[in-house]
Amino acid sequence: MSNVLVNGGTALEWSVENPILPDGVIGTESDTTKFKTGDGITTWNALGYGNEINSSYLWGEQTAEQAGEGLHYFSDVGENGSLWYNNGTYFIGHNILHIAQKLPAYLPSSGSFADNGALTLTTAIPSDVIKAWMYFKASAIYSGSAAGMYYVEMSSTTAGIAYNNVYTEGDAAEPTTKVPFVCTGPGAYTQTNGVDVVMLKYPVPAGVLGRNGSIIVEHWERNNNSAGNKYTRVKHGSTTYTDTVISTSRSTSNYKTKICNMNNEAVQIGNPSGLNLGLGQSTSDSVIGANNTAGLTYIYIAVQLQTATDWVGISKSFLELSRLS
């Protein structure tokens, strides 16, 4: 039968209510990350726990870096898949891992920094972008500041405060603790242009795909409508798959990239360059990659500006990893 998942209360709440779960229904304890599977007869307190969170990360050994992502594998729970626990949420999945971008990631225009991270942009960004990760070149925020993706809170379409929180990889969530800059602003900066800048970096854990698994990346891009070209690229390791130029007449685009292992963890096939998944035909051949997914690899979403006074951003993106042996 199909499993039904109940994201229940605390261990004490379950114990006090002591219900009889229907056959195949899984109840979870929100404070202990333990679960029990009902049989339609036995009360909660008399049921045994299922496998507790162990050291497995997906289908391989869990590294310290992967443990920090909060995803844990319990065990097979029947024909409907496997039970997973991810940062407070339980779900049943057919060996599929989803990662969703939390905050927008932007390459903003040129601008200036006053003291303590006070930002003024030359070109306005959308008014709905209030919290975001933004790229600034070296020494833009203060003399000697490193280039990188910094957390920014905007108070208008051109003004905001940058914080000393730097995005490195993962879902681009809001930082738990904001770290203010205490520094002297250098004034005007010219934004990086003419080269790719990585907005998002998603890990593909070692061995997660198997010999025939797949990676799907979907992202929504936004940009100002101007004469300067803007570029977005999806890469697996050093291999570029989706490679697009945003024209003057467009201010938003949606792209989907699929990459599949070809019965070999170290050989992939993916979208022809510039072909959005689902359009079906292309005069270009498929892209063949050679990234060894038996080890840890990464998906990168990069952008590029032709003109420093333009801007381009990734508003939302999803990563889906599916395993097939």
Image: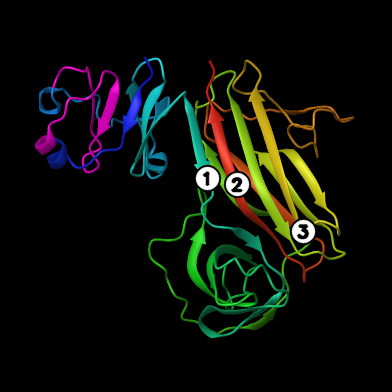
Q: Are marks 2 and 1 in contact (CB under 8 Å)?
A: yes
Q: State whether residue 277 is above or below residue 202.
A: above
Point out residue 314 in the picture as x, y percentages from the top left corner. Answer: 65, 54
Residue at 51% over, 41% down: 99
Residue at 60% over, 18% down: 212
Name which quarter of the figure residue 67 lies in. top left
- Residue placed most toward the observer, 19 or 193: 19
Q: What is the crowding at mark 3: few (fewer than 14 residues within 10 Å), some, or many (at least 20)?
A: some
Query: Which residue is under mark 2?
Result: 317
Q: Secondary structure at mark 1?
A: strand
Q: State whether residue 260 is above or below residue 169.
A: above
Q: Magenta segment range?
A: 15-42
- Image quarter of the N terminus: top left
Query: Which residue is under mark 3?
Result: 251
Residue at 44% over, 75% down: 180
Q: Amino acid at mark 2?
A: Ser
Q: Is residue 41 magenta?
A: yes
Q: Is residue 294 magenta?
A: no
Q: Are marks 2 and 3 in contact (CB under 8 Å)?
A: no
Q: Secondary structure at mark 3?
A: loop
Point out residue 116 in the picture as x, y percentages from the top left corner. Answer: 50, 81
